[in-house]
Amino acid sequence: MTLPAAPMVAQYLLYAAVALVGVHLLFLLLLLGVAMLRARALRARRAVSAEIRPALHAALVEFLAGGKDDSIIRDYSRGHRDDIAESILLFQGTVGGSARDRLCALTQHLGLVQEWCEEGRSRDVIRRRAALANLAFACSYEPCRRLAADLMLETLQDEDEEVRLSACRGVLLSEAPDQIKRLFELALQPNLLTRIVLTEDLRRHALSLAAGPVKAALRSGEAKRARATLDILVAWERAIPLEELREFLEHRDRDIRVLAFRLASFVTVNFESRLALLRSLNDTDAAIRGLAIVAVGRQKMTQAIPELARCLRLEGLQQARQAAAALGDMPPEGWRALEELSTNPNPVTALAAGEALARAKREA
Amino acid sequence: MPDLSVVLTLVVVALVIAQAVLAGAGLKALLAGYFELRRSLRSTSYDFGSVLLKSPIVPGVSMVYAAPDASPKSRARVRRLLDLHFGRPEIVVVLDGETEEELGRWVQEFHLYRQERVVPEDLRAEAIRGCYLSSDPIRLLVVDKEPGGAADAHNAGVNAAQYPVIGLVDGEAEFIPEFLLRLIRPMLGDWDRTAAVCGVAPAVAAPGLAGSIGAIESLRMWLVRCAAFSAWNKLLPVPGACMLVKRKAICSVGGFRDGTTGLFLDLHAGADGKSGRIAFVASPVSFRPAATTWADLHRQARSDQRQLAVALGKLGGGAGREFFGLFCFRGLRPVLETAAYILAVAGWITGLVDPAVAALVLVSSVGAGIVISMAAVVLRELAEPSGMAPGSVAALCLMAIPENLGYRQVRNLWLMAGYFGAPAAKKRKQGRAVGK
């Protein structure tokens, strides 16, 4: 290329660049048109929803209060099925018992349950998610549960986490022991969200699970499984019979120890575990000492009073307060110790003991 | 003279090619961001919020806030943090070398009392003068320390934090009280592999030309620096973002060296796939308030550039090759573009550069800029309808034209001043100590 040809090349390049930008702009204008149409449709849908929702809500409230007239709901159910479903689901956290059954029966009579079952098999994850969440609510009603049972079991293997979780919640409502055990195993997997959601739903099966699967998981010898199980037990906050905690109170994994001490505050523990609790009042880890003080207090272990008094004399304000509270829970010996220590020359000890004694007497 | 003409023409052409490459890369990033946004928004839902709120299995979060001063604004910020909805939150406020009088204001506002406590020294930070708790039923820990700058204050806050997850909020961010519940979800879904989560959404456009231009800038940033970077696992916090970072991950990179951008750069650099991914939450958990005036636009551009300059280094060497693209866009592009304008105009006036070549500069900068800005508006609407009226969407889209004809050229100057005029890291670290 010679230099005199440069202006011509530059001109061609300019034309090409302008054309390229122009094509892009035209394409974007086309997309803008699509976006505007979508925006208009969305706004129109929202406007209609906003218009009918109050009437729907009022009709549902009346229906739940025992009203027989569901004509408004049925009228709207022909053209506004999404609005009906969303309005019904607004009540899922607020109604229980027979009112909940009536609501679920209504969803069945309106054909919503069948629709959700179909949508639960959709390839669109958003539709599947919404359908399974709705079904998980409706499954508290036995006839709905029968309709959705197969789908619920199928979707336990879904690729989407939320779909799986909704399916788990629905399956748990079936109360089948083998399914409960299976879902407890699922809760022990590393996914924390699954564990958190299932722990909540498994709580009402705590006693039956504690008898078998919980013990098996704790005895598995795998630290991760043991930690997950303790996590669940602590979250349940149930006084389940779980005597053999000693192994975990003295475990080499600090996280497991912390969980075991938190658990020791509300489960019944055996002699060995009590001894482990006592020993831990002298642990080198201050956080463990603090947890041990709380656990000893909750277990009302009067044999620990001298150790608690020592903690009250030697620990910092926060743990001295915990030790004093533990002593306050053990009248009359604990109170006597507090009375003595409230005149201690150490201001921290005297303050904590005085506060705890006053509180204990006030609450007695 | 002919030699000079050839040289000048070649330089301008080289600059045009560089601009075209950057514009192409920008458009590609926008598309990547669009697809990532679609994916991210589809996988986001707000179910289980009440379960997360109640469950003791959800790890606690320590919100670390390095208070710049004891002004009513800073104290109001702490009040907002105390209103967060979460099961186990803790607010750690770090006072970086505040005077007795300033400390007194904090004590009075939050009814603080001094507490003796041993703060771990996992990260290097200036000495702590005292820790204070509130006698009100609020989970507030105030750490009073010797002056050392913002990064040092953050390190002290992390040291004092009791929970395994550290929460951070950008200084300009407006956030919703549920943001911790939303941000913690990606972490819970993949606890072992997720080191951090970052959430932000674009602000709603303010009225007026400046407001619309601010909204377009905010959309571009959201699509590229949030969504596209997240798709490439290179997510960095942007102004207005809220973040959760695992305490262990912060300690593994030696803590903050300068701001949150620097921390995330270190997390990426130190990750090698070990520390884990940084997840992006595209839902409206927080945002930077929209610019309403030209002064706002100037301030926002300057502060963002300064943060990037400090994190990336003046020559882009601070973050390795991974973020060289970002350096090219934010550090180099304004310089190249301004140089191209000057040379093209000078060459055209003196007759040394062919008018067609000079016009190419305009097409590759202004034309491409209009395409990119319009694409940002349209792609956002297609990824997730903003709820704006159709007419407003069209109007915002057309604002791309005035944005690129005048404002863009002025903004280049702001960006250059912001990037190359940023104070050196050493000076920043002196922080309040210098001011006193």
Image (cartoon, coloured by chain):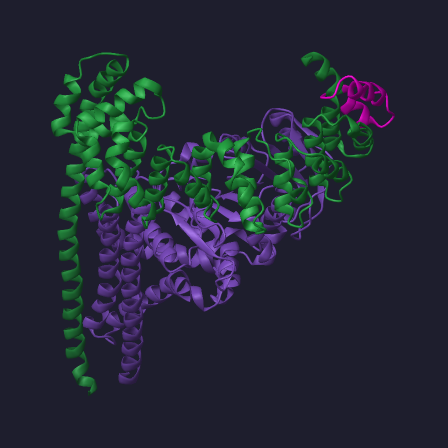
Q: Characterize the magenta stretch by its predominant secondary structure.
A: helix
Reply above or below: B18 against A328.
Answer: below
Residue at the image position 82 percent from the left and 18 percent from the top: A336
Q: Is residue A175 visible?
A: yes
Q: Nearer the viewer, residue B286 or A68?
A: A68
Outermost residue to the bottom: A2
* Residue A143 versus residue B291 in the image, above or below: above
Answer yes or no: is residue B88 visible. Answer: no
Q: Which chain is purple?
A: B
| Region rendered in magenta | A329-354
Up the image or down, B274 lies above or below B89; here it is below
The residue shown at (74%, 29%) is A323
Instruction: Point out the image quarter for the N terminus of chain B.
Output: bottom left
Which chain is rendered green in the image? A
Residue A156 image position (x, y, % from top left): 34, 45
Where is the C terminus of chain B found, in terms of image quarters? top right
Where residue A260 appears, as percent x and y from the top left, is: 63, 39
Res. A242 image quadrant: top right
Residue with the most extreme right position: A345
Q: Would residue A341 be counted in the magenta stretch?
A: yes
Vertical side of B336 occupied by A343: above or below: above
- Which residue occupies the foreground of this view, A41 or A228? A228
At x 25% / y 38%, what residue is drawn?
Answer: A131
